[in-house]
Image: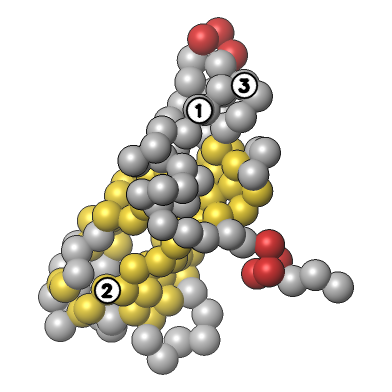
């Protein structure tokens, strides 16, 4: 039996257009708003056409010491060229945390499958 985790791909987002890029502060104070931005195709644009597109991005936060992450948001992109409207895989979100942890972003390309990336966040 295959595990979903074994299907995720990753890499350096500067050279791979499918890896979600996470823009987040490195350090924040407990209880402050944490603003993050996640996108696919920052250095090398993803085509986002009717034939080849990013269908969704999901963002999670795994606090240090916790077994499971909390889903911050789930975003779907519906327009892939219908009526010449093209969505771009870019999202922003805000959340608050009381402990340090890891921000995890996942995305799905209809041709190249599942992708992931993560960054550490220190909460003081």
User: Where, by quadrant of the figure, is residue 81 drawn?
Assistant: top right
Q: Is residue 53 above or below residue 75?
A: above
- Rounded to the nearest angstrom, the CA distance separating label 3 from label 2 is 36 Å
Q: Residue at x 80, y 70 (%)?
A: 2
Quarter of the image for the C terminus: give it.
Answer: bottom left
Q: Residue at x 48, y 74 (%)?
A: 69
- Rounded to the nearest angstrom, the CA distance separating label 3 from label 1 is 9 Å
Which numbered disc flags the more N-terminal residue, 3 or 2?
3
Q: Judge left or right: residue 2 versus residue 119.
A: right
Judged from the image, the secondary structure of the residue bearing numbered disc 1 is loop
Residue farthest to the top?
83
Colour theme: secondary structure
Q: Position of residue 26 (x, y in %)?
A: 20, 69
- Rounded to the nearest angstrom, the CA distance separating label 1 from label 2 is 31 Å
Which numbered disc flags the more N-terminal residue, 1 or 2?
1
Residue farthest to the front?
15
Q: Residues within 10 Å of mark 2 (few under 14, many from 20)?
A: many
**Residue named by callout 1:** 47
Q: Residue at x 52, y 28 (%)?
A: 48
Q: Position of residue 64 (x, y in %)?
A: 37, 86
Judged from the image, the secondary structure of the residue bearing numbered disc 3 is loop
Viewer-proximal residue among 31 and 13: 13
**Residue named by callout 3:** 50
Q: Residue at x 52, y 80 (%)?
A: 68
**Residue named by callout 2:** 121
């Amino acid at each position: 039996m295959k595990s979903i985790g074994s299907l995720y791909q990753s890499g350096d987002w500067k050279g791979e257009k499918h890896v979600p890029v996470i823009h987040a502060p490195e350090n924040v104070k407990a209880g402050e708003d944490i603003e993050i931005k996640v996108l696919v195709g920052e250095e090398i644009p993803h085509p986002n056409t009717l034939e080849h597109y990013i269908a969704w991005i999901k963002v999670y936060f795994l606090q240090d010491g916790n077994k499971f992450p909390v889903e911050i948001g789930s975003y779907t992109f519906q327009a892939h060229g219908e009526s010449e409207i093209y969505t771009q895989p870019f999202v922003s979100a805000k959340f608050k945390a009381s402990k340090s942890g890891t921000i995890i972003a996942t995305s799905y390309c209809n041709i190249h499958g599942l992708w992931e990336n993560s960054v550490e966040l220190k909460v003081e």
